[in-house]
Each structure stands twice: as C-alpha cells, then as structure tokens.
Amino acid sequence: MISPADYELRVEHRHEPFADEETVVWHITRAGKFTSVCDQLLSPVAATVPMNQIETVPPEALCPECSGWYRAILEGG
Ligand SMILES: [Zn+2]
C-alpha cells in the first residue's frame, strides 16, 4: 500500500527557451529518489518538501500529473 509518508515534493527549475524567468514546478518523488511519479529526472540537489507540507506549495506550481496521482492515492485510501 502506498503511504504519502514514503513520498516528498522535489522542485524542478525549468529554463524555457526565450523566457527571461525560470519556471518552478514541484513534482512528487519517492523519498530520497530523484525520478518523479510523472517520470521526470530531477536534480539530486533540488529543494524538497515533505508530503505533509504540500499545502505550503502554491497549487499552480504543482505538476498536474504528480498532483493528480497524489489525489488518486488519497481518494483510494
Ligand atoms: Zn510531475
């Protein structure tokens, strides 16, 4: 069974071509791992946030795939 405690949020800094500012996207990974549930390889030195503090991440900065996966396991019990 999947427990949210086994997971954490890891940030991705996306550098879009031709954009002045980088985009920040928060993905969900297994704790201590660098590949998100949406299959992005993230930096080992990227900032992380525990899953129980997901409310501290702005919803618009959450990866839609990762947050959809997370909602699904919460609803699935
Ligand atoms: Zn993701």
Image: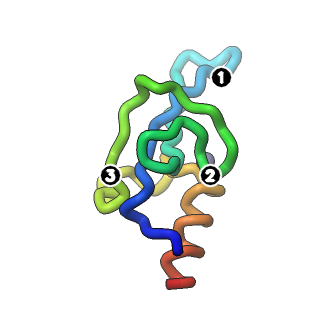
Residue located beneath label 1 in the image: 16
- Would you name the residue on which mark 3 appears? 50
Q: Is residue 7 above or below residue 23?
A: below
Q: Label 1 sits on what residue type?
A: Glu
Q: Please state which amino acid type lies under the numbered disc 2.
A: Val
* Mark 1 CB near ligand 1 (8 Å cut): no
Residue plotted at (59% across, 75% down): 72
Distance between the Cα atoms at labels 2 and 1?
A: 22 Å
Under circle 1, the secondary element is loop
| Residue hosting label 2 | 37
Apparent side of residue 49 relative to residue 1 in the rendered image (left or right)? left
Q: Which residue is depicted at the point 37% across and 62% down?
A: 5
Q: Residues within 10 Å of mark 3 (few under 14, many from 20)?
A: some
Residues tagged 2 and 1 counted as in contact (Cβ below 8 A): no
The residue positioned 30% from the left and 53% from the top of the image is 56
The tag earlier along the polypeptide, 2 or 1, is 1
Q: CA distance from mark 3 to mark 1?
A: 27 Å
Q: Position of residue 76 (x, y in %)?
A: 56, 83
Q: Secondary structure at mark 2?
A: loop
Which-is-in-front pick, marks 2 and 1?
Answer: 2
Query: Taking 66 as reference, is 69 above or below it?
Result: below
